Image (spheres, coloured by chain):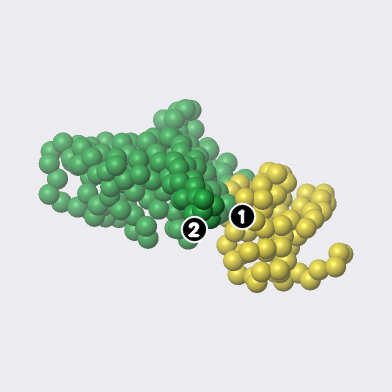
């Protein structure tokens, strides 16, 4: 019997097991400021720990990726309505609790500044430097009439479907849904 | 002072989670394997986080010193 051959076959099998990669796959579903902060803190922390990180933005989460400076035309009526109703970018997000018509959110942002907690702007900048990948759900964008041209400039940003997320999630040692 | 030279001092004073380990992971890449970074932080969470980071990334915390309102870590790049 060839022990070495068996060992290499076994090693190939172990490498192909689900969750074998030192990688984090996260679904960023929520468009709430607090949950987006938590997502980005975990993502940048994981990247700093040497993990590969892929964020899958879907539903309300996608609005956080809009760039307020970019304008795109050619939207349907419903697309325009969604565009109008949803926050235009990460600096317009609200807290999931204690928003209090804006007072609570403003107070938290003020407190974060005082305590030197990184803002979403700083966290996105760190994420980009650390090579965190951002994937946007094609169906969510299409449903809400959003276009890639109105999204932020980010080095590792692409539009994908659920199969891409699942392929990433399957090989990741950590998967989260926020 | 123990028997190692400090290649670089990284000032993370005032920074909150996750920025100390984000900065550390970026700076460790800029020193050579075997060199030591002195890291200054005021974040109490880094007492647990820096050793966890080192364990996960395969680097070593040689020692840490706690002073009033300041923690010093000595981190060696191992790979």
Evaluate if marks 2 and 1 touch, with contact meaning CB atoms under 8 Å apart.
Answer: no
Tag 1 residue: B57
* Quarter of the image where the C terminus of chain B is located: bottom right
The answer for which chain carries disc 1 is B
Q: Is residue B77 above or below residue B64?
A: below
Label 1: which secondary element: helix
Q: Is residue A157 above or below residue A176?
A: below
Chain that the image shows in green: A
Nearer the observer, B9 or A101 = B9
Kindly identify which numbered label has been placed on residue A130. Answer: 2
Q: Position of residue A31 (x, y in %)?
A: 38, 37
Q: Position of residue A75 (x, y in %)?
A: 14, 45
Residue at point 82%, 53% (across, down): B65
Residue at point 49%, 58% (across, down): A130
Residue at point 59%, 66% (across, down): B29
Nearer the observer, B55 or A27 = B55
Residue at point 27%, 43% (across, down): A161
Which mark's residue is nearer the viewer, 2 or 1?
Answer: 1
The color chain B is rendered in:
yellow
* Quarter of the image where the N terminus of chain B is located: bottom right
Which of the 4 image quadrants contains residue A56?
Answer: top left
Label 2: which secondary element: loop
Q: Is residue B39 above or below residue A96?
A: below
Residue pushed farthest front?
A: A1
């Amino acid at each position: 019997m060839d022990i070495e051959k068996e060992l290499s076959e076994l090693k190939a099998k172990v490498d192909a097991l689900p969750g074998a990669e030192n990688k984090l796959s996260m679904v960023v579903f929520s468009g709430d400021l607090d949950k987006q902060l938590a997502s980005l803190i975990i993502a940048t922390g994981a990247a700093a720990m040497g993990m590969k990180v892929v964020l899958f933005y879907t539903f309300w989460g996608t609005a956080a990726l809009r760039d307020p400076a970019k304008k795109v035309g050619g939207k349907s009526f419903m697309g325009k309505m969604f565009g109008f109703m949803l926050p235009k970018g990460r600096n317009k997000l609200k807290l999931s609790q204690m928003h209090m018509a804006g007072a609570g959110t403003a107070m938290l942002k003020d407190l974060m500044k005082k305590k030197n907690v990184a803002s979403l702007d700083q966290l996105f900048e760190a994420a980009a430097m650390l090579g965190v990948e951002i994937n946007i759900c094609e169906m969510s964008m299409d449903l809400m009439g959003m276009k890639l041209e109105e999204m932020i400039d980010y080095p590792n940003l692409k539009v994908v479907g659920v199969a891409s997320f699942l392929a990433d999630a399957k090989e990741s040692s950590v998967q989260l849904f926020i | 002072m123990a028997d190692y030279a400090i290649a670089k001092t990284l000032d993370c004073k005032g920074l909150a989670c996750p920025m100390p380990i984000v900065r550390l992971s970026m700076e460790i890449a800029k020193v050579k394997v075997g060199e030591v970074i002195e890291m200054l932080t005021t974040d109490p969470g880094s007492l647990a986080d820096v050793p966890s980071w080192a364990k996960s990334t395969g680097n070593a915390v040689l020692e840490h010193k706690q002073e009033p309102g300041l923690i010093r870590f000595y981190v060696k790049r191992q790979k």
